[in-house]
Amino acid sequence: MKIFTTNNKFYTFLSVVFLLALWKAGAELMDSELILPSPGKTILAVWELFTQADFLSIIGSTVIRGIIGFFISFILAMSLGIFAGINQKFNAFLQPILVTIRSTPVISLILLALIWFDVNKVPVFIALLTMFPFICTNIIEGIHNIDTDLIEMADVYNIKTKRIIQEIYIPGIAPFIFSGISSAMGFGWRAIIIGEVLSQPTYGIGTFMQNAQTYLLVDKVIAWTIIAIVLSYIFEKIIRLTERQIVVWNK
């Protein structure tokens, strides 16, 4: 098992080296820092961003918007998803709404949000609508995949509802919840930054990415992109670590 893990890490490292080499070759081919700066120049740009006085405010603003949007969408998804999972009529009612939200282009939602809300609330609203369908759908699927024989057996032995929820429903849907959260966060971060690019709040990765693009600072655009990717990776790791702690029956 240890050898298998080591091999995976080696191939992951190899993939990163390949991407950097491809980037370096592309920069050499373009031969223009205004079109595609080299990896070295971009790393320097990342360092410059880290040393900015307001760097933490920029990063913190985006992260806070993402967390607020996530928690609102999670609470809403849990409430509606559980009810839809156990009630077929409500599920039939909810499905067209979920499909509509999932199918609506993010740019359309942002343009409408710019009319309806303050610029600081636009990314939060976009995060909510982007994350909610993923989590809600997974919760519904999780409930539908619970073994009905276990529920019937619990009813036969007059097991209390609280215990059924704690020992059957929650363990049954937990893997689906974490899968939904992982997908939601992946799409959510991108949607938040797009929202910031268009709404231009005072602080936010998207705001400064757009400012860099305006002044043709391509190295800064890529640097902010790298920071956004790292943030997404960190949250993905947190989700997976939390899943391993909670979903103990998978070990």
Image: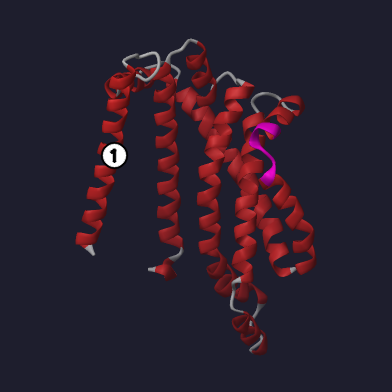
Mark 1: which secondary structure? helix
Tell me which residue sits at (63%, 89%) in the image: 157
Horizontally, is 83 left or right of 48 in the view? right
Quadrant in which the C terminus appears: bottom left
Pick whichever, 51 or 179, lies toward us: 179
Tell me which residue sits at (31%, 36%) in the image: 19
Seen in the picture, residue 231 relative to 173 is either above or below; the reply is: above
Residue with the most extreme left position: 3
Is 106 within the magenta?
Answer: yes
Seen in the picture, residue 117 relative to 232 is either above or below; the reply is: above
Quadrant in which the N terminus appears: bottom left
Horizontally, is 33 left or right of 149 in the view? left
Q: Which residues are magenta?
A: 103-108
Q: Position of residue 84 (x, y in %)?
A: 72, 63
Q: Main secondary structure of the magenta part?
A: helix
Q: Position of residue 231 (x, y in %)?
A: 43, 36
Tell me which residue sits at (64%, 48%) in the image: 132
Which corner quadrant of the image does residue 49 belong to? top left
Residue with the most extreme front position: 29
Residue with the most extreme bottom position: 156
Q: Amino acid at mark 1?
A: Val
Total marks placed: 1
Is 233 within the magenta?
Answer: no
Label 1, on which residue?
16
Q: Position of residue 124 (x, y in %)?
A: 63, 35
